[in-house]
Image: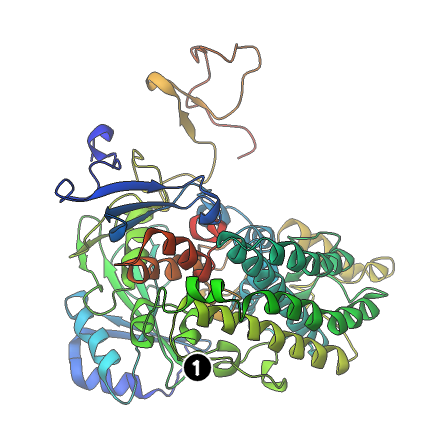
């Protein structure tokens, strides 16, 4: 290990029994269908995959170490950049974990807006998945059609926060601000238009014989293996395990909304495709319920040790000024302890494990990334399949390398 | 210290006796600190017991407590934390084992194959060796990386950067030097970078 030369794995020396009748093929990290910088080394016998290894780390930026150097509030922006396709889910998981440490409650309006933002994020993330997954398998049109819809969601995020992909709008203690003027009309228009737009894409794929040929009975995985591997999200549900953290351990008031958990039967690429499509419609149902019954009141906690006072208060309250100053310079000090809250992100269970030593910076800040754990399934799904199936299977796992490498 | 009424505490305590070193409840989470020699047995018990069915492996992570100034759960330097979930009961449980520098801890792969990547990541970032793990190779870090960056002795900033040919210098670009065929002689080397 001390000599770097002997420690470097190369494609030639990675597998021990290379040589007989097998061939090593390197895929990535610049391969367009690996959804980022995933490198896969395949061992092939003819065109059949007999072994496979994922090489990751090309995007590693040491965020978990960096967080130990930052105040809690400043860690929020790093969470967006992990799963950059569903930044709001990351923000929420991070905020909930810190709120568990601080032991504070968020008012109903804040919780409802959080649900609204994360469900919009889920749809946006699934839109990217649908577009790229179809593109990988040669269907060009859904990519353009569904990205048009995603654009509308990003526009709405921009209305909220001024940022399209990394809003950082959900922070420990609530949100950074209330729902903006004119947002509701835009959202209602989206709720009205989206099912038809999604239906257009569905029409292209769901009964398409080429699509079925490429996806049915490809990459099959059983529910028991899913659990043992730790898979979560649409993958485990497509294998017949009806487990959704929004139902089993509700957070942010998910118990108040009426929605179904789509479950598949075969656990193949096609089922995962169907489950995600159905999830988008369920998310839309949740969003509609949120906007119909949006409670009045404050959107963030009134605990001035965590949430800064409104700007107007600073002019006539000395105490508010002190709170404001202390919060933006020193931050807050959660009590000594450790916390973990897992939420149902678009890709699976995402949660933050945070250890606090009572200072204003986390002692340990660890994310449980759904993509990394789900990636373990790739090997089990690809064994014995053809090389062309790898592309379909990666697409169906729906990975984001920003989250895997962090 | 809060108390949580959970059947796991009694059952694991009755089954494993002294191997259950400490039970800790914080907020809604339950942490069982177990003897690492019995870790696999405890995990298997929780997985297979029809009352609990902790069949879902969620996560494995680690924390270096070498700069910790408060009360500890376990005396060792590192705590490896396993996060298991029971879909049947919708409950979560954490198993903790303590590992000292230079010691090994049994890998949980025989019980949950999903532990492979998480344990490999812990080895990569902390240097905790998992006995029986098939591939303790660099994972997130480059293959020629030396050291384990999430250990507390690694500074949070102002680190020297290794350049080619063994030269070291601060991670600040010197515009007075040419880019191609550069030499970093005359740089401040390991002096503190301001502002850190």
Q: Nearer the viewer, residue B181 or B10?
A: B181
Q: Is residue B32 left or right of residue A295?
A: left
Q: Looking at the image, is B21 positioned above or below residue A79?
A: below
Q: Position of residue A192 (x, y in %)?
A: 76, 74
Q: Which residue is mark 1?
A: A242
Q: Residue at x 75, y 61 (%)?
A: A156
Q: Residue at x 80, y 70 (%)?
A: A189
Q: Looking at the image, is A291 positioned above or below residue A121?
A: below
Q: Position of residue B169 (x, y in %)?
A: 43, 21
Q: Quadrant of the N terminus of chain A?
A: top left
Q: Residues within 10 Å of mark 1 (few under 14, many from 20)?
A: many
Q: How is the image coloured?
A: rainbow
Q: Residue at x 43, y 11 (%)?
A: B183
Q: Residue at x 19, y 86 (%)?
A: B14
Chain letter of mark 1 equals A
Q: Nearer the viewer, residue B21 or A398?
A: A398
Q: Looking at the image, is A358 positioned above or below residue A78?
A: below
Q: Is residue A370 left or right of residue A4?
A: right
Q: Looking at the image, is B167 positioned above or below residue A294?
A: above
Q: Can residue A27 be seen here?
A: yes
Q: Position of residue A393 (x, y in %)?
A: 40, 59
Element at label 1: loop
Q: Quadrant of residue A260?
A: bottom right
């Amino acid at each position: 290990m001390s000599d770097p030369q002997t420690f470097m794995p190369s494609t030639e020396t990675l597998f021990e029994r290379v040589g007989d009748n097998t061939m090593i093929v390197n895929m990535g990290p610049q391969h367009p269908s690996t959804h980022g910088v995933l490198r896969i080394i395949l061992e092939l016998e003819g065109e059949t995959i007999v072994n496979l290894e994922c090489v990751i780390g090309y995007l590693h930026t040491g965020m978990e170490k960096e967080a130990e150097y930052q105040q809690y509030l400043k860690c929020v922006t790093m969470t967006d950049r992990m799963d950059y396709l569903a930044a709001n889910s990351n923000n929420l998981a991070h905020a909930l974990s810190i709120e568990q440490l601080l032991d504070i409650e968020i008012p109903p309006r804040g919780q409802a807006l959080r649900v609204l933002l994360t469900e919009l994020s889920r749809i946006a993330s699934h839109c990217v998945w649908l577009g790229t997954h179809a593109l990988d398998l040669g269907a060009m049109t859904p990519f353009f059609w569904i990205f048009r819809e995603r654009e509308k969601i990003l526009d709405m995020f921009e209305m909220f926060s001024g940022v399209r992909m990394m809003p950082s709008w959900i922070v420990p203690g609530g949100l950074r601000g209330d729902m903006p003027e004119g947002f509701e009309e835009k959202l209602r228009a989206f709720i009205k238009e989206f099912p038809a737009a999604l239906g257009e894409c569905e029409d292209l794929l769901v009964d398409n014989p080429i699509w079925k040929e490429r996806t049915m009975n490809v990459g099959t995985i059983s529910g028991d293996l899913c659990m043992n591997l730790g898979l979560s999200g649409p993958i485990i549900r497509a294998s017949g395990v009806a487990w959704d953290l929004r139902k089993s351990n509700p957070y942010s008031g998910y118990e108040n909304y009426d929605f179904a958990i789509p479950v598949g039967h075969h656990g193949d690429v096609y089922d995962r495709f169907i489950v995600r499509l159905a999830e988008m419609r369920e998310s839309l149902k949740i969003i509609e319920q949120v906007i119909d019954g949006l409670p009045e009141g404050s959107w963030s906690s009134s605990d001035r040790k965590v949430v800064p006072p409104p700007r107007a208060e600073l002019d006539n309250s000395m105490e508010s000024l002190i709170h404001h100053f202390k919060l933006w310079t020193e931050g807050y000090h959660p009590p000594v302890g450790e916390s973990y809250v897992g939420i149902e992100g678009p890709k699976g269970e995402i949660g933050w494990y945070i250890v606090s030593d009572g200072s204003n910076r986390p002692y340990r800040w660890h994310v449980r990334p759904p993509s990394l754990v789900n990636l373990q399934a790739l090997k089990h799904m690809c064994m014995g399949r053809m090389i062309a199936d790898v592309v379909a299977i990666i697409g169906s796992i729906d990975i984001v390398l920003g989250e895997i490498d962090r | 210290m809060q108390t949580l009424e959970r059947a796991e505490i009694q059952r694991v305590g009755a089954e494993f006796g002294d191997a259950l070193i400490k039970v800790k409840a914080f907020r809604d989470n339950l942490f069982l600190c177990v003897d690492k020699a019995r870790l696999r047995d405890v995990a298997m018990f929780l997985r297979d017991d029809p009352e609990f069915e902790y069949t879902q492996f969620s996560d494995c992570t680690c924390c270096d407590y070498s700069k910790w100034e408060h009360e500890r759960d376990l005396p060792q330097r590192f705590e490896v934390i396993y996060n298991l979930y029971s879909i049947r009961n919708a409950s979560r449980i954490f198993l903790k084992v303590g590992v000292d520098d230079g010691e090994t801890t049994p890998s949980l792969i025989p019980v949950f194959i999903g532990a492979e990547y998480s344990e490999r990541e812990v080895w990569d970032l902390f240097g905790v060796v998992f006995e029986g793990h098939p591939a303790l190779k660099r994972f997130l870090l480059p293959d020629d990386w030396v050291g384990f960056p999430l250990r507390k002795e690694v500074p949070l900033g102002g680190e020297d950067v290794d350049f080619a040919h063994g030269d070291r210098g601060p991670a600040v670009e010197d515009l007075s030097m040419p880019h191609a065929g550069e030499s970093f002689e005359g740089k401040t080397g390991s002096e503190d970078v301001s502002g850190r």
